[in-house]
Amino acid sequence: MAPAMRSIVIALAAIATLGLRSGTTAETGTLRGRIEVPDAAAAVPRPSVADLAGHSHSADAVDRRRCVVYLASAPMPAFDELRPGRARMDQRGEQFSPRVLAITAGTIVDFPNSDRTFHNVFSLAKSRTFDLGRYAPGRTGAVRFDRPGIVPVFCDIHSHMSAYILVFGHPYFAVTDDAGRYQIPNVPAGSYSLMVWSELGVAAPRRVTVPEGGTIETDFQVGRDR
């Protein structure tokens, strides 16, 4: 075989191999486990506003056990698989529901007012500052979240109302259930830093290796952030 032809064959073989490695059919695995959190919740600071409702609400009135588990960085194919959609954070009983929401960048979040009083949803976060203004029961406001980051959410009328929206640039994250369990499926095989976010404190990150077609069990314990 002539040298020129041999070079072409080698180049084509390299391109074909690269195409197989960079395709969307790569083997994946699953990350799952359980997060242990402190029994009591720490107080959450927020902007000082007047509580026009005049009600007294305990700091433990809402479920603060929700944690978000996620990959610190994602493989390149993740950005091709990013599918922004629509999510919902209700206002009911003068609380946000869910209190913790995790979404992909580009997702629109609806904030329906299911109460019998006015609400005003706002955030001062650098990644997404917004103010929906005061709106009546039965009305809905909506916000698009285009940049990754943590967005604390408040109500300008009810100072006891607060929530968090975590916006990710990849789809490899999960919110724990009532038992503290999480599962992140379809993670491309490889090594990653697995992180936990919780308003109750911090947990040390873990280095995990996801096998092709396998499942990795990784537990965390959240400690009070003093």
Image: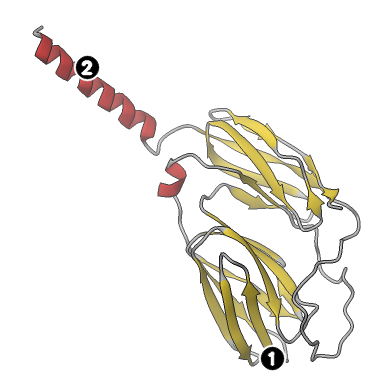
Relative image position of residue 41 (x, y in whole percent): 87, 61
Q: Are marks 2 and 1 in contact (CB under 8 Å)?
A: no
Residue labelled with disc 1 = 118
Answer with mark 2 or mark 1, whichever residue precedes in sequence: 2
The secondary element bearing badge 1 is classed as loop
What residue is rendered at 76% in x and 77% in y? 161
**Residue type, label 2:** Ile
219 vs 111, left or right, is right
Q: Is residue 139 above or below residue 109?
A: below
User: Residue type at mark 1?
Assistant: Phe
Residue at 66% across, 85% down: 120
Q: Which image quadrant is residue 119 in?
A: bottom right
Q: Position of residue 23 (x, y in %)?
A: 36, 36
Q: Dot 2 lies on which element?
A: helix
User: In this orientation, which residue lies closer to the viewer: 129 or 141?
Assistant: 129
Distance from disc 2 to disc 1, alpha carbons, whole Å, reads 69 Å
Q: Is residue 67 above or below residue 88?
A: above
Q: Position of residue 211 (x, y in %)?
A: 57, 28
Residue 54 at least partly seen: yes
Instruction: Report x, y in % for residue 118.
Output: 69, 91
Q: Is residue 212 above or below residue 129?
A: above
Determine which of the numbered discs, if any, sits on residue 10 in the image: 2
Q: Residue at x 64, y 74 (%)?
A: 123
